[in-house]
Image: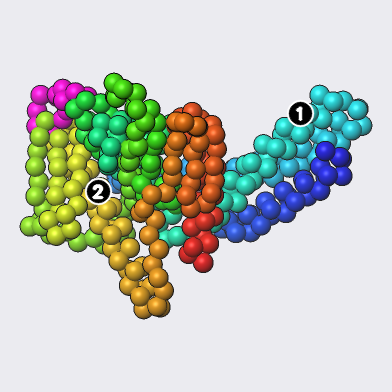
Amino acid sequence: MAVNDNAEEIKELAATLSSVEAVLDLDSKHAEIERLREEAASPDLWNDQERAQAVTRKLSSLESEVGRIEGLRSRIDDVAVLFQLAGEEDDPDAHAEAQAELTALRKEIDEVEVRTLLSGEYDRRDALVTINAQAGGVDAADWAQMLQRLYLRWAERHGYSTEVYETSYAEEAGIKSTTFAVKASFAYGTLRGEHGTHRLVRISPFDNQGRRQTSFAGVDVVPVVEQSDHIDIDENDLRIDVYRSSGPGGQGVNTTDSAVRITHLPSGIVVSCQNERSQLQNRATAMVVLQAKLLERKRQEEAEKMSELRGEATTSWGTQIRNYVLHPYQTVKDLRTGTETGNTAAVLDGEIDQFIESEIRWMRQQEA
């Protein structure tokens, strides 16, 4: 790439970052950080642990967000100097180093630009992800477990905290269902496009004749509820069952009936939690999951009602959204955006950012 081309690309990246800074309003974020720092320093804050955790988490998230943007601005300035020095010294190694940094900068600025598209009411929140095995028998159960690992690895790659609330293991292999939280700012906005049916085509490891098998798993993504949300739940509408937590193969993982399953009778929504040893703790966590699912249902109903009033057709993303083909060729393709890759191993190991970024842009176009 010519020197002028590099200079032009650096200029374009700087302009893109300026647009991101304007959308994010860094001045207001600095003011919010100062306010939260003062609140965090109050000796009375930890009298309310839930409030204290919310304050410290929001402060950490804002500091990380602002720090990342300011770090990118500094790196843009530095990479221009790197190219200048490489040209003056006619050093191929220095030029290669500068080019690698420019490529990395382009990728990161693209990521933060996509983040500015997340402006929905709940986009900033943590995400609750539920995965259910669908058609395909034991292969579908195995596929559901593969998807659970995919999303947990994705979160791990980004340094996001996760907590598995419940996993229902299948008898032969894999899982029937699982629910886990991704605890990070904008986790819901980032992952909500993953909602839908995921299809896997492969040679079944469970078929003695080595035949090709198609299996399906459903992914449901909802925002975590907050204190400001108003979700009224009548205790008379709930059926609460307790049972013993089980692991792979049906083995018991504790000796008490501490796991809790809550059925919301009017909606038919069923949630479970078995990650805590205390029945009371599992019940409290299951109620949080139930509230999140009811909040999402309420949001969808309101959106559909508004669309009807406007005479618009509602769009559902809860259909088949992505194909993962491992035989006779290797490819993962999103049916909405057309994003595709042949590196199936990387995708199954959690490298799904290209799919997430393209679906965020796609969803924004659908909502415009």
Residue type, numbered disc 1: Glu
- Quadrant of residue 294 in the image? bottom left
Residue 237 at x, y percent in the picture: 10, 57
Q: Is 98 in front, or is 24? A: 98
The label on residue 368 is none
Residue depicted at x 27% and y 41%: 135
Q: Is 5 in front, or is 69? A: 5
The label on residue 288 is 2
Residue type, numbered disc 2: Val
Q: Name the residue under label 1.
A: 97
- Quadrant of residue 255 in the image? top left
Magenta residues, start to end: 245-258
Q: Is residue 107 above or below residue 27?
A: above
User: Looking at the image, is mark 2 or mark 1 earlier in the sequence?
Assistant: 1
Q: Is 322 in front, or is 348? A: 322
Residue 340 at x, y percent in the picture: 54, 42
- Quadrant of residue 151 in the image? top left
- Residue 252 magenta: yes
